[in-house]
Amino acid sequence: MKFNTKIPKPLKQAYNEELKRYSFCLENKQYSNAWYHLERSHIIGQSYPIEHTYSHWLMLKFGFMQKDTKEVLGQIIRLLVGGWKSFIDHVPLGNTGGANVPPLKSMPIPNDIKNLFNSK
């Protein structure tokens, strides 16, 4: 069994870039763009417990800011199980992490992120 503990440097850089873009969009009240970058951070970091959990934490905070009860409840559930699923490398690849998608559903990975995964 493979255990994921540390995100590779190229993925960490891309993950952090998505979080910077999320923050910029949030500060500028571009909420749909902010969410888009949170989803991308989730896709990049979902195989690594710390990054995966942090993406869900930000999604939970975003749900509270937007007063979105469905998102808040969905993120609480994801926070309880997401990190350990990452640790044992059992995540649905491509899943964007929001409460608007089933938590165990694999989804297509955007090409630029797929290229990142292939080069790590």
Image: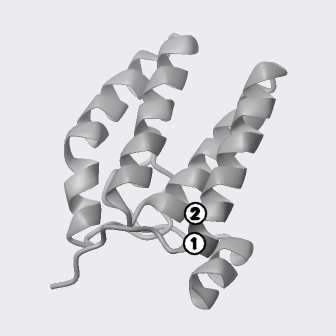
Circle 2 residue: 12
In depth, the one of 42 and 96 nearer the eye is 42
Up-down relation of residue 62 to residue 23 (above or below): above
Q: Is residue 27 left or right of residue 103?
A: right
Q: In this orientation, does residue 100 appear?
A: yes
Residue 30 location (% of width, % of height): 81, 26
**Residues packed near mark 2 inside 10 Å, few (<14), some (14 to 19) or many (20 plus):** some
CB under 8 Å between callouts 1 and 2? yes
Up-down relation of residue 111 to residue 53 (above or below): below
Residue drawn at x 51%, y 53% is 42
Q: Secondary structure at mark 1?
A: helix
Q: Which residue type does callout 1 highlight?
A: Lys
Q: Which residue type does callout 2 highlight?
A: Lys
Q: Which mark is residue 9?
A: 1
User: In which image quadrant can residue 24 be found?
Assistant: top right
Residue drawn at x 27%, y 52% is 83
In depth, the one of 11 and 72 nearer the eye is 11
Quadrant containing the C terminus is bottom right
Quadrant containing the N terminus is bottom left
Residue 78 location (% of width, % of height): 29, 41
Residue drawn at x 70%, y 37% is 22
Q: Is residue 89 left or right of residue 55?
A: left
